[in-house]
Image (cartoon, rainbow, N blue to C red):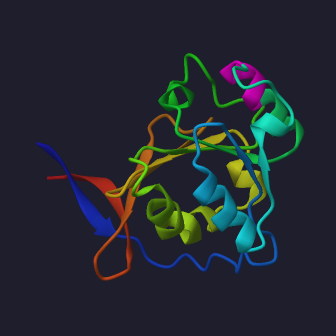
Amino acid sequence: MTEYRWVERPDDGAPDFKVQRPRFYVDQGIPESLIRSIDARGLKVRKSTEDLPAHASDDQVLRVASGHDMILLTKDMDFWDDRKHPNTDTSGIVIINTDERRIEATFWYYYDFICRFTKAEWAEAKGLFNQEEWRFKRGEWFEEKRFKIGEDGKLYEWVRVDD
């Protein structure tokens, strides 16, 4: 019988990403408070409304984000669907699936995890996170990977354990 469980993921010696911090292209559903918070911490952030009309298509938003070589930050769950938005020709997508009251706390809770992946690893990748867990998938992976930060502050991965 196949079973899954959360297993502590050892520190993989990921480099300090303060040298190359992620840059975010923010979709219109992201609240202004989070945009200000990202900007206040000295991170590069650009709003989609600076380049596109308010009702631009998802494809247009993703194309412009990739053109700026920035990770798309959105609340739009359509971006998780690989049939609508395949993991190709992107600079990465982060989807925050939580309510307005928790969005800023959820983003900063996972920010260090976002930074564990290099710019090259974010290319053609997607991350989906909420207050409980983080899911990450890349073009060549056949199944998504799930992670969470435990109450002890350690990183855990959802893994299959065969008997």
Q: Is residue 103 above or below residue 51?
A: below
Name the spot of residue 124 as percent of width and height, x first.
69, 39
Magenta-drawn stretch contains 46: no
Compared across the picture, whether 97 is left or right of 121 comes to left
Please tell me in which quadrant of the rendered image residue 132 appears. bottom left
Q: Is residue 35 left or right of residue 60?
A: left
Quick check: 135 above or below 43? Answer: above
Specify the quadrant that holds the N terminus. Answer: top left
- Give the residue drawn at x 56%, y 29%: 79
Answer with the quarter of the image where residue 149 lies.
Answer: bottom left
Q: Residue furthest left?
A: 1
Residue at 49% x, 34% y: name it. 142
Magenta span of residues:
57-62
Task: In this rendered view, identify the residue nearer to me: 113 or 159.
Answer: 113
The percent coordinates of residue 35 (x first, y second) are: 67, 56
Residue 127: x %, y % from top left: 54, 47
Does 28 appear above or below 151?
above
For residue 109, above or below residue 59: below
Q: Residue at x 44, y 37 (%)?
A: 143
Depth check, front residue: 129 or 3 = 129
